Amino acid sequence: MDDSAPDGPGELFHRGTTAYDAGDEATAVALWERAATAGNAAARHNLAVLAVRAGDTAGAERWFRLLADDGDVDAQCHLGDLCLDRGDEDGAVTWWRRAADGGDPDALHNLGVHALRADRPDEAEAYLHLAAESGHPAAAYALGVTYHERGERTAARLWWGMAADAGLPQAEEALRETGGEPDDGAEPVEVSGADVRDAAESGDTDAMIALGVQHEQHGEADEAERWYRSAADAGDVDGVYALANLLRARGDTAGAERHYRTAAEFGRPTAQFNLGVLRYDRGDLDGAEHWWRTAAAAGEHDAEYNLGNMLLRDRDQPAEAERWWRRAADGGNPYVHYSLGVLAVGQDRTTEALLWFTLGAEQREPGSLYHLGLLHEQAGETDAAAGWYRRAAEADHARAANNLAILYHRADELAEARTWYLRAIELDDTDTRAMFNLGALHETRGELADAERWWRRAADGGNAGALRALADLADGA
């Protein structure tokens, strides 16, 4: 039947909608039922929604099932909800999974919440992530709760921020309640007094360390070492740690490791972290992991980041690596935020990547600025991309300068393009892409000698396109 014919399903649906808008629900239902019986999906959906509102579970299930059998993920999700309402959890999960396979955010959220209640946190996090990536506010809020309960405050606040921006009141409340969480960092010990040397010679270990710092700042390493050793010999763990740092700076790795270990065994997290670095540098991955885990358990954010880095690169454990990086993010290091953004991009979690890159960009982290440019360019938002590339290039990011130049080149703004190609080469004289592009710009302007000069530099660096361009130039000579 012709959908637009007087009694066609499309026309019946339209007439039903007109009646409903005029307040005549009975006529609307009669017309929609005729349209739905003839296969109109929109009419079936409206009838199912009205049945839900009226408490007519059987009627709602009838219409939703017809839609679901045709692959309608929203209807599949609603069928899951109806199953849950009557206590059929297995049926609910079955329908939610069908809807989730089709990418329905509500179904993904429901599966995440169901997994949380069943104490399957990893499964729950995976579903909530997928739903939050699709812009589901409740999933973003639940994900934030999950992270906050694990102590990953920065990650939690990022997702709560997204949910709050979508108008979710509980997310706004969570942000207010956690906005003033204290920093766990300890205040540094200060030694005051006009005659620090007298105090040091009288056995005051704080004064010994302070005197060592003064000598170290003046380049008097031998004197600094003497006072640090005095404090260390007196059993001051800060003296032991200061001595380890000085020995490491002087190239005495064995001596540094010995004293780091002493300080580490006394429970100093920064010593545990540095001991892990020394172990990693000599290829002792197990030793590095042990000390970084020990320091990370004490809240040492650098150790959390390094542990995650090692788990990702050397152990091929990206999920655990990401968990440690989320904890490290609470330390405020923008490079950690950037790293989490890169990891999210690699797993096609673009929404989360934008959150992390934006956080990094707030502290002018060049890689975050650059990747924001990339993401906006991939989305076709050229003006926004140019803005981020410019900020990254001004923070000395060479690839951002090259990409900004390309945008100007495409827009035929050749003077600006040339400026940024030259800046890219200045920042990284090994990157042959900017050299090749600059050669192409000169060719466009008919400046073949300049084109050849830049292509030769690019070719000398192994750029295949430059080699071909030079060959074409020679053929046309």
Image (cartoon, rainbow, N blue to C red):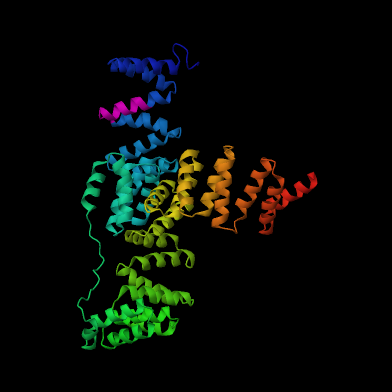
Above or below residue 126? Residue 95 is above
**90 or 301, which lies in front?**
301
* Residue 473 located left or right of residue 215: right
Determine the main secondary structure of the stretch shown in magenta: helix
Q: Residue at the front extreme?
A: 194
- Res 331 quadrant in image: bottom left
* Residue 180 located left or right of residue 147: left
**32 or 172, which lies in front?**
172
- Residue drawn at the location 33% of the way across and 17% of the way down: 28
- Res 31 quadrant in image: top left
Where residue 350 appears, as percent x and y from the top left, is: 44, 47
**299 or 42, which lies in front?**
299
- Residue drawn at the location 68% of the way across and 48% of the way down: 450
Where residue 335 appears, as percent x and y from the top left, is: 41, 59
Above or below residue 110? Residue 328 is below
Which quadrant of the rendered structure holds the C terminus?
top right
Residue 88 appears in the figure: no
**115 or 199, which lies in front?**
199
Where residue 50 appears, as percent x and y from the top left, is: 30, 26
Residue 52 appears in the figure: yes
* Residue 56 located left or right of residue 431: left
Which segment did they paint magenta?
45-56
* Residue 374 located left or right of residue 153: right
Above or below residue 476? Residue 5 is above
- Residue drawn at the location 30% of the way across and 54% of the way down: 146
Report the number of numbered marks: 0
Residue 164 is covered by the magenta coloring:
no
Above or below residue 446? Residue 242 is below
Where residue 279 appears, as percent x and y from the top left, is: 44, 77
